[in-house]
Image (spheres, rainbow, N blue to C red):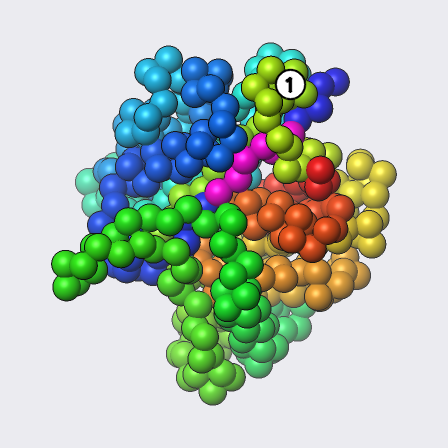
């Protein structure tokens, strides 16, 4: 089997809702990522055999094949095809896995995996809401509702159920949220994200042109008092907007290439794709699947959690990484070392390659070997990707 390598990885800094990136059409922002990947790798644009782009809310400005539109908004030649995929929060992690599988199979040599989500311009749940308002029904048929005994599947319900199952208090979740902000703030101060962030030109309210180079959602002055003052999302629960991921605008991407392509185009690898895994479980609890998925992925790869030097577990809600940490017997210091979705934002379809970009650069920055990435996804699905620094 052919080996697959990540030869370039970049992301935008996260933009808060109606913040720095809200003025960018998502296709144009995606196009900027594609151009940056080509520039970083120095690959011949015509050699790119496919673009696989993740996006969750594929409606309005993100409709009509956002993957192809990102190519059309870039400097890539018209000959570069694209496909848009939706695996909810894991969309661009799945894009990466599809790209790696294409290279490993020997059917393609250079593939871009990327993601885009403008949650300011296309709010979360827009496709479902607009469909209901137009009288087009809901995604969940009567058969599905009867089978699982629920009227709808909600990640907010799943987060509360998970916190209850693992016994996490509001204080424990808030403490984790605070640590996420502290780590992200420290990483920003130390310029740990400098190599991975693509500067994006923006115009501020005063008409001044600036460069967006820092994640906008980090609360550098966060405290237990400020996080604890945020109201609960539901009475009697423990989940708040402060211990959940932030609404975020952003784009990210990686180039995956074969050894043959690296030799032909003089590409330098950042990491080797070591192992890929995806699985599914309880669609009601929904957010727990990264735990069994990681256990199976490690077993399949012949590795243990102790072999992993860094792990990125998407901070959709604080109970997710905390439960994963406990059940895997993992090291807290290796978990989301530079912060995560709670502090840096979670731009849905872009988060997969965003986390991988941070993970690969963190492995190089620390001189470590193995990194593992996983995230929970609507429907009770989880992806796990293990990479090895090169």
- 297 inside magenta stretch: no
332 vs 88: above or below: below
- Residue sitting at x 66%, y 48%: 364
Q: Quadrant of residue 62?
A: top left
Q: Magenta segment, principal secondary structure? A: strand
40 is higher (above) or lower (below) than 312:
above
Residue at 18 percent across and 59 percent down: it is: 208
Quarter containing the C terminus: top right
Say if residue 362 shows up in the picture. Answer: yes
Measured as percent of width and height from the top left, residue 253 is found at 48, 38
Q: Residue at x 27, y 56 (%)?
A: 210
Residue nearest the observer in this picture, 376 or 267: 267
Can residue 144 be seen here? no
Dot 1: element:
helix
Residue 123, image x, y percentages: 29, 51
Q: Is residue 249 above or below residue 28?
A: below
The residue singled out by tag 1 in the image is: 263
- Identified at 35% across, 37% down, the residue is 32
């Amino acid at each position: 089997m052919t080996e697959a390598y990540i030869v370039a990885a970049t992301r935008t800094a996260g933009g808060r809702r109606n913040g720095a990136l809200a003025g960018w059409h998502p296709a144009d922002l995606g196009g900027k990522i594609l151009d940056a990947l080509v520039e970083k790798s120095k690959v011949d644009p015509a050699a790119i055999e496919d673009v696989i782009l993740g996006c969750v809310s594929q409606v309005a400005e993100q409709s009509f094949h956002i993957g192809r539109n990102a190519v059309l908004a870039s400097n890539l030649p018209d000959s570069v095809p694209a496909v848009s995929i939706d695996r909810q929060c894991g969309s661009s992690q799945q894009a990466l896995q599809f790209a790696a599988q294409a290279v490993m199979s020997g059917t393609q040599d250079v593939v871009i995996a990327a993601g885009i989500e403008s949650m300011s311009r296309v709010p979360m749940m827009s496709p479902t809401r607009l469909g209901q308002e137009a009288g087009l029904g809901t995604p969940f048929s009567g058969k599905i509702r009867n089978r699982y005994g629920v009227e709808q599947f909600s990640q907010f319900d799943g987060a509360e159920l998970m916190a209850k199952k693992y016994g996490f208090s509001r204080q424990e979740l808030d403490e984790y949220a605070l640590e996420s902000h502290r780590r992200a703030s420290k990483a920003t101060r130390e310029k740990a994200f400098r190599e991975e962030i693509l500067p994006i030109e923006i115009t501020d309210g005063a008409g001044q042109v600036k460069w967006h180079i820092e994640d906008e959602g980090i609360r550098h002055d966060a405290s237990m008092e400020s996080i604890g003052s945020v109201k609960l999302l539901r009475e009697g629960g423990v989940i708040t907007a402060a211990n959940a991921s932030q609404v975020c605008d952003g784009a990210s991407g990686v180039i995956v290439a074969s050894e043959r392509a690296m030799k032909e185009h003089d590409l330098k690898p950042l990491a080797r794709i070591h192992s890929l895994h995806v699985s599914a479980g309880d669609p009601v609890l929904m957010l727990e699947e990264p735990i069994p998925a990681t256990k199976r992925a490690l077993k399949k790869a012949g590795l243990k959690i102790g072999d992993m030097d860094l792990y990125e577990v998407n901070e959709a809600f604080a109970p997710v990484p905390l439960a994963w940490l406990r059940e895997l017997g993992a090291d807290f210091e290796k978990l989301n070392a530079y912060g995560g979705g709670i502090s840096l934002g979670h731009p849905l379809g872009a988060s997969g390659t965003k986390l991988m970009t941070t993970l690969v650069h963190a492995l190089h920055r620390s001189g470590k070997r193995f990194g593992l990435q996983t995230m929970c996804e609507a429907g009770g699905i989880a992806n796990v990707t293990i990479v090895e620094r090169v």
